[in-house]
Amino acid sequence: MANQSSLPLYERVNLRNRKHLAVELLLLFFLFSLLTYHLLSLKQYGIPALLAFLCESFFTFIWILVLNIKWNQIKYVEYPDRLLKRKTELPAVDMFVTTADAGIEPPILTMNTVLSLLAVDYPVGKLTCYLSDESASPLTYYALVETSKFAKIWLPFCKKYDISTRAPFRYFAITSSKPSQENSPEFQQEQKMVKDNYEMLCQKIEDASKTHAPCNDFPEMDKNNHPAIVKIITEEEGVPCLVYISREKRPKKPSHFKAGAMNALTRVSGLITNAPFLLNVDCDMYVNNPQVVLHAMCLFLGVGNERDCAYVQFPQEFYDGIKDDPLGNQYVVLVKFVGHGLAGIQGPMYTGTNCFLRRKVIYGISPDQKITTGELSDPDLQRKFGESSPLKESVAHILLPSISSKGGSSSFVEAAHRVAGCDYEHGTCWGTEDVLTGLGIHRKGWKSMYCTTDPVSFQGCAPTTGPDTMIQAKRWATGFLEILFSSMSPISATIHGKLQFRQCLAYLWIMSWSLRSIPELVYSLLPAYCIISGSHFLPKVYEPAILIPVAVFLIFNIHTLSEYLKIGLSARAWWNNQRITRINCTSSWLFAIFTIFLKFIGLSQSAFDVTAKNPSINDDKDMKNKDCSKFTFSESLIFLPGTTILLVNLTALTIGMVRLLVTTPHSNEAGIGELLCSLWAVLYFWIFLKGLFGKGKYGIPSSTIVKSGVLALLFTQFCIWSTNA
Ligand SMILES: O=c1ccn([C@@H]2O[C@H](COP(=O)(O)OP(=O)(O)O[C@H]3O[C@H](CO)[C@@H](O)[C@H](O)[C@H]3O)[C@@H](O)[C@H]2O)c(=O)[nH]1
Ligand SMILES: [Mn+2]
C-alpha cells in the first residue's frame, strides 16, 4: 500500500464531451453559412440583410468565445482525509464576511453565515472570522456578540453529531421538515436545547432591532460619517476568534464599496492575525459543507508549484431557489460550464465571494518573484501599503516568511483603527475586488483553481423580484464593461502581461455582455421592421437556403435544452432562462452601456445597489414558489426597452397577419420567416405581455406603457416612412 503521506491531495479529471463539441462546431458551421447567405443577398435585400449580417457576425463571435470556454472542461477531486493524515500543521485562515446595511441584509442572516464559518471542520486555533459592517450598526455588533455566545453551544453540537448543515436557520428548517426517528433520545434532547437557544438568539436580535443602541459599548452613529471601529469579540476556548470592523466613513470621501471593505479587512486582519490564507464570503453565503477549508487546502498544499494556485474559487449556488428559476438568476448551467471551462485554461475568475486566496497574492506579488530583504525597503513598502509601521512589518512577514517578528497580535488593535481609516489608501496600491482582482492576478501569470464539492460548498440567496434581478444584472454588466474599456482590460493584460490568450477570450466573453445588448436589440426589432416595411432578411420558404436559419434555430435550441435536461433541470427552467437572457440582454445590459456613458461624460458616479436579501426562515416553500414565480415590475426605466420590443412586435404581427389574410397568396409569399421570428420575440417577452394586464407589482406601470407606446408608434412610422423613401 502506498505511503499515506505521498498520495496526492487532489486529482484532475477531464470532462470533455466529444458529442457536445461536435454539435457546437456544427452550429458554428451553420452560423458561417448564414453569414455567407446574408453577404450574397445584400444586393437583393439591402439594409435589412446588412443589419442581419452585422448582428449575426457579433453572435458568431460570441459563439466562438463560448466554444473556447467549453473546449476542455475539467474538474478537481480533493481528498481531505489524506490531508488530515499528514503530519504537517495546517495553515491559518482569516475568514471575511461583508455586510453593507442591516436594513437590507437582516443581521440574523449574516449571523448564520458567521456561525457556519465558525463551525467548519478545521482546527479552531487556526481560524479567525472578521465581519465588516459598512453601516456601523449597533444592532449588527450586538448580534455578533450574542452570536459568539451561542457559538459556544452550536459548535460542540455540530461537531459531536457531525451535523452537515451548520447554518442554524437552514439546519432547523431541514430537520423540522423531515423529523428522523432513528436518533437517540440524547441527541433529540440536545437538539431541542440547541434549538431553544437559537430561537432565543433570534428573539434577542429581533427585540434589539426595536431599541436604539442595544449595546452599551457601541453608541449609535451616522452610518456615513463615523470613525473606524475595530472590536475583538471573543477569545474563548473552543470558538474561533471573532473581530468586528466598521471602517471609517466620511461624507465626500470615496468608499469604493465592497472593494474598500475588502481592503480594510485585509489590512486589519494583517495586523491582528496575519494568516497566509484568506476566505471571502458575502453576508448571505453560508457554508453548506463543513469540509470546505480542507478542500481548499488540498488544492493549495497539493499543487507542485504555488503559481498554479493563487486562489481557489467555489461556485455560487443558491438555496430554496424558486422552482424552474422563473427569474433566471440561479445561473446553474452558466456557472457550471464557465467554471469547469475556465478551470481547463488559466483558472476560474474571482467572483468576489466563496473564494480562498493567498494573502501574498493580494499583496501584489508575481508567482516567481523572489523577494529579498533589500526590496522590502521602507519607502517601497510605504508607497504600496501605506504608512502604518506595524502593517508594513506584517506585510514583510508574509512576503518574506523568514523574518523573525511574527506580525499580528491583538495588541495591534490601536494600529488597526488607523488602517481602517478612510484616507489610508490614498496614494497607495490598495486594490480592487471581484473579476478585476482576479484578472490582475491572472495577468501576473498566476493560475487559479475551481473547487466543486458534494454537498455543495456555499449557498446564498438569489434576488426574489424582477427589479432586483435586473438591477443586479445591470451592476454586473456595468462592472464588466468598465473593465473592458479600462487600462486593465484583458487585451492589454495579454499583450503586456501574462494573461493567456484563451483566458483573454474567456474574459472577453463575460466583459462584452453589455455590448451584446445592441445587436440583440436590433435583432429583436428587425423582423418587425421587415414585416411593417415589406422588406426581407430571411430566405423565402421555398428557397433551399431557408434550411440554414432553420438549422441554426433548431440546433441552438435543442442543444441548450439538452444541456439543461442532462443535469436534471426541467425544460421549463431552460425556457425561463432563455427568455430572461433575452430580457436582460436588451434591458439591464443596455442600461449598463448608458451608465458607463454617463459616468464617462461625468454625469453620474458609480454606486453599488445592494441586493435585498429575504431569508426564507421557516417559510412555506409552496407559498414562496407561488408568490415569487411571477415576474414583478417597478417604475424603473429598465422595463422600457422590453415593453417597447413587445409592442413593436405585436404591431408587426397584427399588420403581417392582416396582410396575409387580405392579399392574394402570390403577392406576399414571403415574410413567413419574419413573421415566425416576430412571434418568437413575443414569446420571449411573454412576461411583459402578462405585465401589460397585471395588477400592482405584477403589472407594468402605465407610465412605462405610455412611453413604450409612443416609442413603438415612432418606430412603426419610421418603418412606413422608410418604405416610401
Ligand atoms: O458598499 C458595499 C456594498 C456591498 N457590500 C457587500 O457585498 C456583498 C455583495 O453584495 P450583494 O448586494 O449581495 O451583491 P450580489 O450581486 O449578490 O453579489 C455578487 O456581485 C458582487 C459584485 O457586483 C460581488 O461583489 C459579490 O461577491 C457577488 O456575490 C454583500 O455581502 C454586501 O454586504 C459591501 O460590503 N459594501
Ligand atoms: Mn448577494
Image: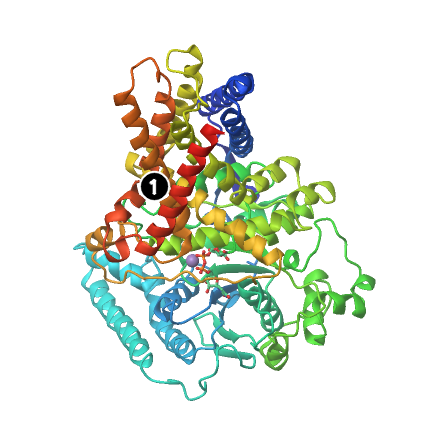
Q: Is residue 331 visible?
A: no
274 with respect to 37 (left or right): right
* Residue 17 % position (x, y): 46, 26
Q: Name the residue under label 1.
A: 647
* Residue 139 % position (x, y): 39, 78
What is the residue that sits farthest to the right in this orientation? 374
Question: Is the CB atom of the residue marked by disc 1 within 8 angstroms of ligand 1's nearest atom?
Answer: no
Relative to the observer, which residue lies in front, 711 or 278? 711
In the image, residue 422 above or below residue 42: below
In the image, residue 349 above or below residue 465: above
Q: How many labels does the image show?
A: 1
| Residue beneath the point at 39% across and 57% down | 636
Relative to the observer, which residue lies in front, 417 or 600? 600
Q: In which quarter of the image is ligand 2?
A: bottom left
Relative to the observer, which residue lies in front, 307 or 638? 638
Classify mark 1: residues with Cα within 10 Å, few (<14), some (14-19) or many (20+).
many
In the image, residue 391 above or below residue 356: below
547 with respect to 491 (left or right): left
What is the residue that sits farthest to the bottom in this orientation? 216
363 with respect to 508 (left or right): right
**Amino acid under label 1?**
Leu
| Residue beneath the point at 36% across and 68% down | 106
| Residue beneath the point at 55% across and 18% down | 43
| Residue beneath the point at 57% across and 39% down | 506
